[in-house]
Structure formats: structure tokens, C-alpha cells
Image (cartoon, helix red, strand yellow):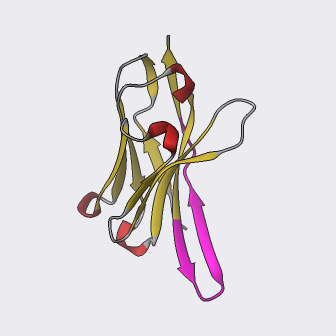
Amino acid sequence: QVQLVESGGGLVQAGGSLRLSCAASRSISSFNDMGWYRQAPGKERELVAGITSGGSTNYADSVKGRFSISRDNGKNTVYLQMNSLKPEDTAVYYCNAVVYHALGSSKYWGQGTQVTVSS
């Protein structure tokens, strides 16, 4: 069973920074894709940033230029560096990992970490 454990959330003022970490219970090299999603109250969960096993990244338009996703294979950890935070970034942030196989895909989620940005 794969476990993803997020950390690094908290309360920060607008314009501030936070770095989220997602530690996996097994080698992250085994995942095809990893990413960060977020869900604000009353809204659907949305992709914030993704990174492939090859290191390619993609970002939601709303966070481009402010957030950066990276991975440390040696520590089995994926990071989300969040700068210039805005109140609208307030949400629960979830780590996600995907493995593609012949029958489809297996998706794994962390328990989430709360990020609150005050104005």
C-alpha cells in the first residue's frame, strides 16, 4: 500500500511563501506522474502542478510564475514551493501519484494539508 504524507501547510499572510512536502512510502521513481491538487470550500478539486518521472512540469494558469514543483528521488519526496501567496490560494492541498499500467492507472492520494492565506 502506498502512503503519501504531506506537510508544510499553515497560515501565512498574503505575499508570503510556504513550501509543501510530500513524502512517499516507496521510491517515487516508480510513479509515472506526481502532482499537487487543491480544494477550496465549495469548489472542486483542481490540479495545481504536476511533474512527470522525466521531470517535465505543468502548472495551473493561476499559479504560473508563483509556484514551483520539484522532486528529490533520493528522499522520495515531492515539493511545492509557493511564493507570492494570495488569499485565493487558500485550500486543502493534496499530493497525488499515478502509475499507469496495462489495465489503466492506479492513483494515490495523501491526507491533505491546509494552507490559509490571510489578506
Quadrant of the rendered image containing residue 44: top right
Is 115 rendered above or below residue 26?
above
Give the camera-side residue of 56 and 94: 56
Give the prevailing secondary structure in the magenta stretch: strand
Q: Looking at the picture, does residue 1 appear above or below residue 80?
A: below
Q: Is residue 27 visible?
A: no
Q: Residue at x 65, y 80 (%)?
A: 104
Q: Is residue 98 left or right of residue 56?
A: right
Of residue 46 and residue 72, the one placed in the foreground of this image is: 46
Picture coordinates of residue 33, whole percent (x, y): 46, 66
Q: Residue furthest left?
A: 74
The quadrant holding residue 106 is bottom right
Residue 54 higher or lower than 9, as above or below:
below
In the rendered view of the protein, which quadrant contains the N terminus?
Answer: bottom right
Q: Which residues are magenta?
A: 98-113
In the displayed image of the protein, which residue is found farthest to the right? Answer: 42
Q: Is residue 110 magenta?
A: yes
Among all residues in the image, which is located at the extreme bottom?
102
Q: Is residue 105 magenta?
A: yes
Q: Position of residue 15 (x, y in %)?
A: 37, 18
Where in the figure is residue 82, as x and y percent of width and height?
38, 34
